[in-house]
Amino acid sequence: MGLNSLTLIKLRQLIDRGEVRPHEILIDVFKRIQEVEEKVRAYISLATDKAYEMAKDSEEYIFSGKRSFVTGIPIAIKDNICTKNIFTTCASKILYNFRPPYESTVTSRLLKDRYILVGKTNMDEFAMGSSTENSGFHITKNPWNLECVPGGSSGGSAAAVAADECIAALGSDTGGSIRQPASFCGVVGLKPTYGMVSRFGLVAFASSLDQIGPITKCVADSAILMNVIAGHDPMDSTSVPLDKIDFTESLGRDVKGFRIGIPKEYFIEGMDKDVEERVREAIVQLESLGCIPVEISLPHTEYAVATYYIVATSEASSNLARYDGVKYGLRVEGKDLLDMYMKTRSRGFGAEVKRRIMLGTYSLSAGYYDAYYKKALQVRNLIRKDFESAFKEVDFIVTPTSPSPAFKIGEKVEDPLQMYLSDIFTISVNLAGLPAISIPCGFSLKGLPIGFQIIGKPFDEKGILQLAYAYEQSTPWHKMKPMI
Amino acid sequence: MEYEAVIGLEVHAQLLTESKIFCGCSTQFGNEPNTQVCPVCLGMPGVLPVLNQKAVEYTIKTGLAMNCRIAPYSRFARKNYFYPDLPKGYQISQYELPLCEDGYLEIVIDGEKRKIRIKRIHLEEDAGKNIHDTSGYSFVDFNRTGVPLMEIVSEPDIKSPKEAALYMKKLRTILRYLGVCDGNMEQGSLRCDANVSVKPVGSEEFGVKTEIKNINSFRFVERALEYEIKRQIRVLSEGGKIIQETRLWDSQAGITQSMRSKEEAHDYRYFPEPDLVPVVVSEEWINEIKKTMPELPDQKIERFIKDYALPEYDADILTAEKELAEWFEEAVKESRKPKEVSNWIMVELLRLLNEEGKEIRDCNVKPSQLAELIELVSKGTINRNTAKDVFEEMYKTGKNASEIVKEKGLVQISDENVIIEAIREVIAKNTKEVERYRAGEEKLIGFFVGQVMKLTKGKANPKIVNELVVKLLKEE
């Protein structure tokens, strides 16, 4: 096993002690990519030449006596996060040739630390989907079973981390798009509180729900990445002004006495037996660490998926209006303006994106607004209040991340509703703007990873990282590697 | 049947902020296409708007000047429609919760004061400009995209095209006083759409309205409305029906033409802008802005009447532009003859400026120079007629009055001996007229005065000439 299989925290030590040089890590990463990428297909584009340049930069930075959290660390970036002059396609044909003239805030912060960009990872087109099968370019496979999906929409990032094709990755999460693929691929995924990480440069799907977050091999790595990417950004009006936080500070602290809420609505008839068992076992494990499980109720849970698909699609229908063939990306010529618009958008967008644009356009239309969009905002408020009252009794809420382990490629493609339901446990968190992490808690009988979710109070990332870390360190799951 | 019009105006005013409403790009007018753009105003994927506080401040200022309630909590909304000059596919505007509501503006029509209620004032971003040429391609200039725009919506309180024009003028004056908009309709920094309907005189019920767009000059406010009102009355009196529609003013043809009907109207699918947080305006902020408010036209008129004993007519004209009012006050400070200064400005200065289409800020004459001219007249150094010529010379050259008087030898002749000599010469030359005068034809006095003035090249003091002519004619 090469340096590519190590964690960020481990490599940080090795680099800082002068035992390993960033370009050595990078060589191992690209060696691994050469071995497995053909099977996994986690990336849309690789930044090979650029990556070696960046490795050199990082070494110079280190030689000049400087270093920071991600200096010299090869990281993969989801292809909906803008990287200056580097293709950023959102896995959509409509942006097949788009090279942003600017850098997103999160990658600017990584650049300041002299990280190494490995490549841009595959995803569901415009982050719309739960399996990465909606990519406009190709399908990504689950490194644990190449016949299964890696989850989505950040499936490429999760697969790249799980397959050791990078050290860590960034994803984005609108309804579970970091946590669900993390659970499918047996890695850690953190969705920060809405407003904790700048969205500037994240190509918007649903602006009031989107958050960028880390996908990593262990909890500590997520904390380290958060140290770099979190914090107020004047370019994002919805980013919250907070003092600088050290997310690693709480790691290793005792979790005795933490009250863990177990929402009864999240353990339902007919849910996958393996998932239920693994999550129950995880709760027992947390108990053995001194946590106190408390049954709670989040009564409006059953409305979450419906609410989400109105709010998210409404915002998306507006956010995606800019892809009109006028300024950048794909243009299909037409006989007049309207014809050009229609041809460009018909050919540029995939089926799922079109479905959501239509749903959203409908919800916002005159005569329907009150019944759909406005009502959805009201229910969203109720869901938020569910969590508020739950958090008066408990410190954290523990749930499965997904109702099932990774499903087969093609299994749910024809049934969008079934696909939407795979986000049932993660969606409420986005509607309420809360932080949540998914961490591995074992495997299904068929050997597929299963993850569970820890939801925290707003801006209590440190708390959930502390609890997740305590669990992780007491279990072997994060050390398991797929055979590809 | 007699009809009366019901008019409401929607005025768009570009704000004079240095930078655009949601990014740092310059708002300057008239530069090379697409030189004042950035990823944010171009609507690149992933960019986010950041609100320009100055634009909010300017809107609040306007709201206060128009007696509006300033919303403590307002928010932006997206107005969705496709057009090449709209890079995001939506315009960030305000919908349910505008910044200012329920104000009014006072106009004076036929000597009577009328309140025109303001429904709302909200803030939004301007779109770009499509340019069509003969190559068969269209181009888009995004320089204007994101320039802050204030929309001022009146209630349908306006009763005639003349009132509409007065309202527009008053609005423009206020905006210019506040320094929030340059009010230039030709360059598009002030634009006006009109909603207009007609109803039988005295009827409570409003008729079906049309919206007139593209009224892009001050002259056209009245003309477009006059046309549209006549058109509607004609349709109704011929037994027809008014269709609710948007009509375009064609200034060349002088008519309005149907652009789209109600059925074709856009569904803008407004919803709250998730990329911006609500605008919270504190009482303290409002008070701070109040402190920076200039004296407004109405207050100034009142003060001019009171402090300078000017007729309302004078005060009205002098306060139409803030710079003009300031010019007046400065001149008065030096000359202490307000009515005299006012006369000079209204009769001479404004005439000269208008002839050249200039504004007071382009004027060569300084207020202190007018004061000096007035002083020369009142001391009797030059007479009033000469002063007019001197003023024109001042306006042309920027020279001081005394300098011109000296250069051209225009000093008034008040020396009685010189004048007597001239009168004697006139009497000697015009013996017939002298006889007629003495025979009782007294009106001939004017003739003699005129001849004396002519002889002295207009420099003789007319008052003295008058007295002496009478005296000398009687003497001999």
Image (cartoon, rainbow, N blue to C red):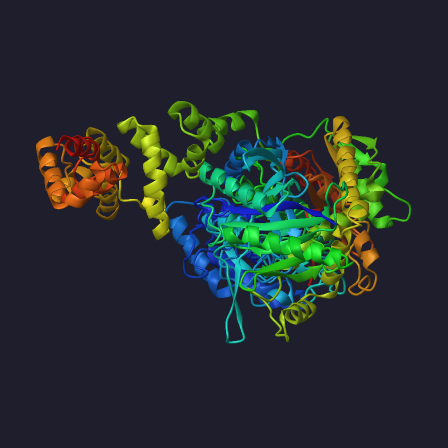
Q: Hey, which quadrant is residue B86 in on the image?
A: bottom right
Q: Seen from this angle, which residue lies furthest top?
A: B307
Q: Hey, which quadrant is residue A156 in on the image?
A: bottom right
Instruction: Write the residue at 43% across / 32% down.
Output: B315
Residue A6 or A115: which is nearer the viewer? A115
Compared to residue B104, the image places residue A168 above or below, namely below
Observer able to see residue B266: no
Instruction: Write the residue at 58% across / 68% down.
Output: A34
Q: Position of residue B213 (x, y in %)?
A: 60, 55
Q: Position of residue B298 (x, y in %)?
A: 49, 31
All told, the count of numbered labels is 0
Quadrant in the picture for the C terminus of chain B: top left
Compared to residue A341, the image places residue A403 above or below, namely above
Q: Hey, which quadrant is residue B374 in on the image?
A: top left
Residue B328 or A316: which is nearer the viewer? B328
Residue A406 or A145: which is nearer the viewer? A406
Q: Position of residue A137 (x, y in %)?
A: 66, 68
Q: Is residue B18 left or right of residue A230?
A: left
Q: Seen from this angle, which residue lies furthest right?
A: A269
Q: Position of residue B71 (x, y in %)?
A: 62, 32
Observer able to see residue B355: yes
Residue B385 or B224: which is nearer the viewer? B385
